[in-house]
Image (cartoon, rainbow, N blue to C red):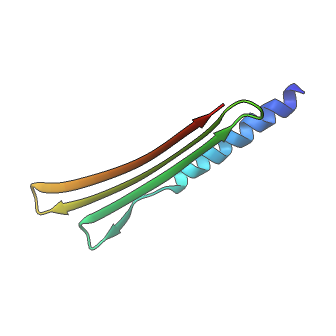
Amino acid sequence: MQLDAQKSICAALSAMTATLLGSGAARAAGTNTVDSSILLYSETGRVKIAEGVFDYGRQFGEERSIGLRLTFDALTG
């Protein structure tokens, strides 16, 4: 039974790592940046966690910039 739980944890950690490494920045017109990521985690019969993050940034010249971050968090259990 312990090996199954350990495999489940390893699979969850692998999925989380792949998600985090797969989320990268995209540049459009040299002045915009867009980043996004998602995290999903669950334990059977216990907790479920979901988090999504979206970042947008724009550079206006050398000294001015604007940024927007939207975050969604959900926790059950």
- From the viewer's perspective, is 47 left or right of 21? right
How many numbered tags mark residues here? 0
- From the viewer's perspective, is 5 left or right of 42? right
Q: Is residue 54 above or below residue 3?
A: below
Locate residue 17, reporting x and y percent: 59, 45
Which image quadrant: the C terminus? top right
Locate residue 12, reporting x and y percent: 69, 41
Which image quadrant: the N terminus? top right
The single residue placed furthest to the right in the displayed view is 1
Q: Is residue 64 above or below residue 11?
A: below
Q: Is residue 7 above or below residue 18?
A: above
Front position in the image: 36 or 43: 43
Q: Which residue sits at x=23%, y=66%?
A: 31
The single residue placed furthest to the top in the displayed view is 2
Q: Which residue sits at x=73%, y=37%?
A: 10
Front position in the image: 36 or 26: 36
Front position in the image: 74 or 5: 74
Q: Which residue sits at x=73%, y=42%?
A: 11
- From the viewer's perspective, is 68 left or right of 48? left
Toward which corner of the image does residue 43 lie, by quadrant?
top right
The single residue placed furthest to the front in the displayed view is 76
Toward which corner of the image does residue 22 lie, by quadrant?
bottom right
Q: Is residue 50 above or below residue 25?
A: above
Locate residue 8, reporting x and y percent: 78, 37
Q: Which residue sits at x=36%, y=61%?
A: 34
